[in-house]
Amino acid sequence: AQKVTQAQTEISVVEKEDVTLDCVYETRDTTYYLFWYKQPPSGELVFLIRRNSFDEQNEISGRYSWNFQKSTSSFNFTITASQVVDSAVYFCALSDLYNQGGKLIFGQGTELSVKP
Amino acid sequence: GAVVSQHPSRVICKSGTSVKIECRSLDFQATTMFWYRQFPKQSLMLMATSNEGSKATYEQGVEKDKFLINHASLTLSTLTVTSAHPEDSSFYICSARDFRGRHPDTQYFGPGTRLTVL
């Protein structure tokens, strides 16, 4: 069975601190996709990144970076120099496009609070 | 690109009435849309997969007759909560995949609809 675990339910940091959100997944499939979404207080889920199982390159986008390690089944997300606007709930998700029709399996989410 | 809208954003209704929520892909065609439900402080729970021109596929435990889904065109899916009761109060979110887009495996989400049943 597929599963995504975000062990950190809440994280609180002070502005400008770096913060890493952990994501561990389980799947028997060899081809799958991993995603991160941001859900600000408004409620809309904002797509941040996708990564397929064959691409283990880390990615950096501005203050955001992602570390994908198949050996540990982890897809961690780091925000550098956090800002108050980063306060939101962040969801990690897993998708098996070919066998499950693209269904997303979400983690429980990590609520990040960045204080000024 | 890949913008998904939902209407209404908020709805308050009396117990026993039916409520229809629309999900539209604005700048792409979506053969598949998904409907999720989210309770406060919880993750998203997939309710059903909506396929254009065919019946929706419901997840285990989701009542088909309670949550009617219609995907009549490539840009519109509707979710009707029939005979709503207070326990149906929740945040309903739809998503869509752009099969012809650069990343057909990515789901793009609408802004959500907050339903309150009195």
Image (spheres, coloured by chain):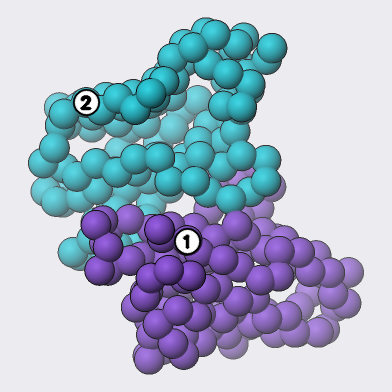
Tag 1 secondary structure: loop
Q: Which mark is residue A91?
A: none
Q: Name the residue under label 1.
A: B3
Q: Name the residue under label 2.
A: A58
Q: Position of residue B115 (x, y in %)?
A: 74, 66
Q: At 14% across and 51% down in the image, what residue appears?
A: A31
| Quarter holding residue B9 | bottom right
Chain of the residue under label 1? B
Question: Which residue type does callout 1 highlight?
Answer: Val
Mark 2–mark 1 CB contact (< 8 Å): no
Chain of the residue under label 2? A
Q: Mark 2, mark 1: which one is toward the viewer?
A: 1
Between residues B105 and A60, which one lies in front from this camera angle?
A: A60
Decide if residue B67 is in sight here. Answer: no
Distance between mark 2 and mark 1 Cα atoms: 27 Å
Residue under disc 2 on the same chain as residue under disc 1: no
Tag 2 secondary structure: loop
For chain B, give the colour.
purple
Callout 1: few (<14), some (14-19), or many (20+) C-alpha neighbours within 10 Å? some
Taking the image as shown, residue B116 lies to the left or right of residue A82, namely: right
Callout 2: few (<14), some (14-19), or many (20+) C-alpha neighbours within 10 Å? few
Chain identity for the colour cyan used in the image: A
Taking the image as shown, residue B108 lies to the left or right of residue B89, namely: left
Between residues B40 and A113, which one lies in front from this camera angle?
A: A113
Decide if residue A15 is in sight here. Answer: yes
